Image: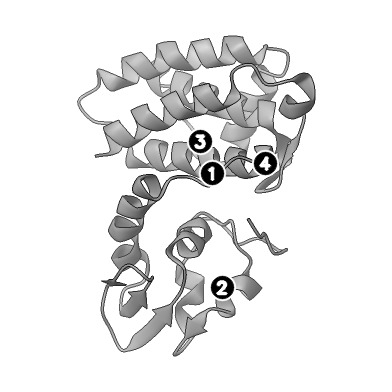
Amino acid sequence: MFEEIYREARQRIIGLTMGLSADELARTVPACPEWTVHQVIAHLSGSAADLVSGRTEGAPSDEWTARHVAERADVPVDDLLEQWNVSGDRISEMPRIPFQLALDAITHEADLRAALGRERLPDAVWQPTLVWMTPRRLEGVAVRTGTGVLGDGPITLEVDGYELWRAFFGRRSRRQMESWAWSDPSPVEKIPFFPPRTTDLVE
């Protein structure tokens, strides 16, 4: 599953970002407030290159991702995309890829789409990972998303599935998560893999 998710995300992101203007590439990505569109692409290309070369010490720390950006600051985006293609083809030959790589790719695809004013990530892309992640992150919570109930337990949560999916990756603030329709909001701290935002993000 994750090999296909990663390959298709790479193809979509390349189609999304190839040929962008200099102004678009310099645009700040609201979900990654310290990065521009160019820098997000640099990270995606860099993480693939690191996986292929085995240069994964420190992953996925801020220092590791910052190195991707710093090392590629002056590399044109079309070259970054070509390098990502080369590394991505080698990754596709591996028997297994880390699931984090696929989740990182679709998370940043969602970030880029929002920053560039494009339509939201298709439901068919994020929904399978929501189904996979929810019972793992929210054990003991029955989550109603509008397309069904995920997990089970004495605590209930009713929330838009895309909002929950984005929150898993730190793209929503604690205030936003607590505002959802909980029977008991105490599990809110279990949601994000990464620290939640300090400010609200509305997409």
Q: Residue furthest front?
A: 119
First of labels 1, 2 by sequence position = 1
Identify residue type, mark 2: Met
Q: Residues within 10 Å of mark 2 (few under 14, many from 20)?
A: many
Q: Which mark is residue 110?
A: 1
The 10 Å Cα crowd at callout 4, few under 14, some 14 to 19, many 20 or more, is some
Relative to 103, residue 7 above or below: above
Secondary structure under the numbered disc 3 in the rendered image: loop
Q: Upstream in the sequence, badge 1 or badge 3?
A: 3
Residue ID for mark 4: 115
Residue 148: quadrant of the picture: bottom left
Q: Which residue is mark 3?
A: 58
Residue 56 visible at all: no
User: Label 1 amino acid?
Assistant: Ala
- Image quadrant assignment for residue 97: top left
Q: Amino acid at mark 3?
A: Gly
Residue 177 is marked as 2
Q: Quadrant of residue 88?
A: top left
Question: CA gap, disc 2 to disc 4?
Answer: 22 Å
Residue at the spot 59% in from the left edge and 59% down from the top edge: 195
Near mark 1 (Cα within 10 A), the count class, few <14, some 14-19 or many ≥20, is: many
Q: Are marks 1 and 2 in contact (CB under 8 Å)?
A: no
SS for callout 4: helix
| CA–CA distance in space, label 1 to label 3 | 25 Å
Q: Which of disc 4 and disc 1 is earlier in sequence? A: 1
